[in-house]
Amino acid sequence: NRERQKLIREQNILKQLFRILRVLKPRLEQERSSVNAANLAHARSDPHFHQYQTQTPSSNDSYPISQQQEADIRYSTVFYQIKSICRHCYRTLKHCQQEYRKNQETIAKEFSFMQSQIGYDILAEDTITALLHNNKKLLEKHITEKEIDTFVKLLREKRDCKFLEYLSDLCVSSNQAIARTQEMICKSVLEKNSDILIRTKLEVKGCVEDTILDDSTGPPIGFSNQNILREVILTWDGKSESIEFMAGVVRDQLAHLRREEFRNILEYYRYQLNLFSHMCFDRQYLAIDNLSLELSIELILTCTKSENLPADLRAGFCRLMIHMHVNRDPQEEVTRIKYARLWNQVKPAISLNEYDQTISGSLEPTEKNENRPKFEATMKFVEDYLKTVVEQPNSFADREQNKLTHEVVNLARRLIFFGFYNFEDLLKLTQTLLGILDTSKVLSSTDRLSNPEQVAAIVANAKSQKYDHVLPTTASFSVNDVVADQQSDVLDNLAYETKMNVIAILEFILDIRLDFRISRLISIFKKKYDRLEPSIHGIAADLQTTDIECIFDSNSVSITEPNLDLDDTKGKTFLKVLLNLIMHDYQPLVSRALSLLFRHFNQRKETLL
């Protein structure tokens, strides 16, 4: 509520909150020191103290100790009350600054004081992170090596995932990389404190039954490539375990002795992957060069493809693939539409094959040959995964799976924009993308509802007030309409962002199709009129009546004129999907869908003008 946020500032409540925090700070430090001293004395009196001292505690080993310490702290009534007051103050500050620039500026004046209270477990670091979120100016001004080292120190002491999240937030602001902060975090985490990270290793094993034997009686000479086992091993605090095994224990074996430890390790590792992605964001080569040696394309793809891992962890690997291996040199975005062309480079005839060579980005031929094979397996995974999404009755029903779908679509977008797909493959991929957006498959599943009670339940759960002013009195209102409305209501923001990425890919494909049509027109013009000087009116008439229409004919059977239809249904599926998208309640998606709809009905105009 902006009015209440404004009132809190105008009534000087923000200043009063900081006065309370300043008054309580000495007492907080005193009580904290007393509690720490008492805990240390209690630990020294424990006969197992030396045993704890000689061992390197893992996050799981230290859990009972930290739990006991928390219980001891709660015994200290004064300390607990002081902490509660401070936490309420910081929680209020956090809410007051949310999406309100003036309050952010007021609170930022006390930034140094808040920094001095990091690590007291009174939500100071939460408030600072919320204040800096998407605020590039404050990030660049206030975040120094001291703050980075403080967060890393707290991460080492508590092994709490939230400090990994804080470091991630400091790397990127409003989808823009903060290069200076990225460099400081890289030096602090990767060079000085690399021991707090979970290490990753890919082990390749061959199946015994697939051993390749030569004709002699000698030992095996190798393994078949079809059944090579790739196993990713995580190492932490002197321990190591297969990531798939740990995920299986967490998912299926509730009584396993190490289930809680494995769950904590996988959660910590997921946040670590997110930190790595933000450290590499926008081609930060200090991080990319350090991390890409350990986290290879093969390792990341192995984990992304593994259905034994949870969807959010697979999404983290997919995101890392984008920022560490795909969005880096020598990849550059292709030029979508080339309006300026050299006459001597225009060919008299152009086919899909020849045109593909012109949209492969800015790479030299040698770089293309070396770079593309590295991502062939990744491209195959993207295509296969998107097809499985299309086959699902509702592509966005599973919110956890939506996280992975979002990252895979984002990966596909990057690969397409960098020219890894030729034009012919793009036309085939379009049908898959339209299938993801098509909700008619959801409606078709309602045709199987033969039970009247099921139909009644669906109608009862619908938001009837939304249709009060348009509901017909006849039976023409179908259950399908209700289900369609329900499906649009349950979509979360991530699903909308995924659809936005699909729309961006479709816009790119339309641009490439437009460029191909322009290239075809120019090649036809050169073939017919290169050495002739006909009248301008004759040229225009000939092009309009004989040559122009053929490049728009989706039913063309000519070998020289490829079918550029996006959906193999003369645009009906494309049109149906766009009409469905403009009925959503998400304004950016509606706007982009309308833009595509206008382009669909103005193909000739945008080509000729």
Image (cartoon, rainbow, N blue to C red):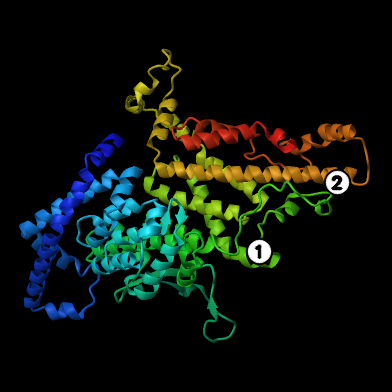
Secondary structure of the residue carrying numbered label 1: helix
* Image point (43%, 19%), residue name: 477
Task: Report the Cα–Cα distance between label 1 and label 2.
Answer: 30 Å
User: In the rendering, at what x and y percent does residue 14 appear?
Assistant: 23, 46
94 or 298, which lies in front? 94
Three-letter amino acid code at disc 2? Lys
Tag on residue 368? 1
Q: Tell me the quadrant of the picture where the C terminus can be found.
A: top right
Question: Quadrant of the rendered structure where residue 274 is?
Answer: bottom left
Three-letter amino acid code at disc 1? Lys
Visible residue check, residue 562: no
Question: Quadrant of the rendered structure where residue 368 is?
Answer: bottom right
In the rendered view, tell whether residue 452 sits above or below residue 407.
Answer: above
Of marks 1 and 2, the one in the foreground: 2
Residue topped by disc 2? 526
Visible residue check, residue 536: yes
Query: N-terminal of the two: label 1 or label 2?
Result: 1
Badge 1, how many Cα within 10 Å: few under 14, some, many 20+? some
Compared across the picture, whether 179 is left or right of 213 comes to left
Badge 2, how many Cα within 10 Å: few under 14, some, many 20+? some
* Image point (55%, 81%), residue name: 221
